[in-house]
Image: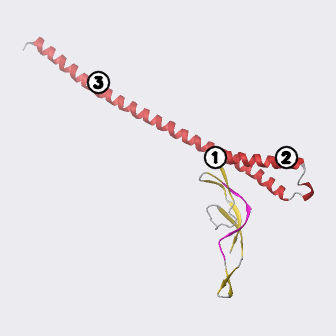
Amino acid sequence: MTKKEEKKDSKIEDVRKELIECEKIKEEYLAGWQRSRADFLNYKKEEFERREKIREFAENELILKIIKILDDLERAKKEIPEDFKNSDWLQGFFQIENQFKNFLKGEKIEEINPKGEKFNPNFHEAVEEIETEKKEEKEGEEEKKEESGKVLEVLEKGYKRGEVLLRAAKVKVSK
């Protein structure tokens, strides 16, 4: 083999080594770009979920404010004198109350009105415990038996949105 051929073979070998090195660098860049792209897509997804949670939180806060207004309307409704109950202008106020209730239904808000149900600390807040007795007849005799853990009165309705509790129902419970 001549010197010229050796030089040529040496150059070809150098080019091959350089090509192999370029291939390695290309693969590193490609892998880095793919990781960056996946990271960015994950970031976008997480950011969307975070914004969605913030939006839901803000909506729930607004709904709680509307519920307080509805509570006040219901309390005022209980205090209306009998001679005013059939007036036209008062029926307008009742219509506003119905609009609030329809709005809440449209937002998939459910009332928690547990009167007569068993007390559930996940959805109810016991404000007061009341001593009660239940009479049972047993073979001609009257026997008094305590009935405990039952919701006797709802002081303030609770509300939930799907599985999220917005406000627990405030209740009086039997002891």
Residue at 58% across / 41% down in the picture? 52
Q: Which mark is residue 92?
A: 2
Tell me which residue sits at (64%, 87%) in the image. 139
User: Taking 24 as reference, is 132 above or below it?
Assistant: below
Q: In this view, does 73 lie to the left or right of 18?
A: right
Name the foreground residue: 83 vs 20: 83
Q: How far apart are marks 3 and 1 (CA)?
A: 52 Å
Residue at the extreme left: 1
Q: Which mark is residue 57?
A: 1
Q: Residues within 10 Å of mark 1 (few under 14, many from 20)?
A: few
- Residues rendered magenta in the picture: 147-159
Is residue 148 in the magenta section?
A: yes
Q: Which residue is drawn at 12% across and 11% down?
A: 4
Q: Which amino acid does label 1 sit on?
A: Phe
Label count reads 3
Residue 134 position, x and y percent, is: 69, 79
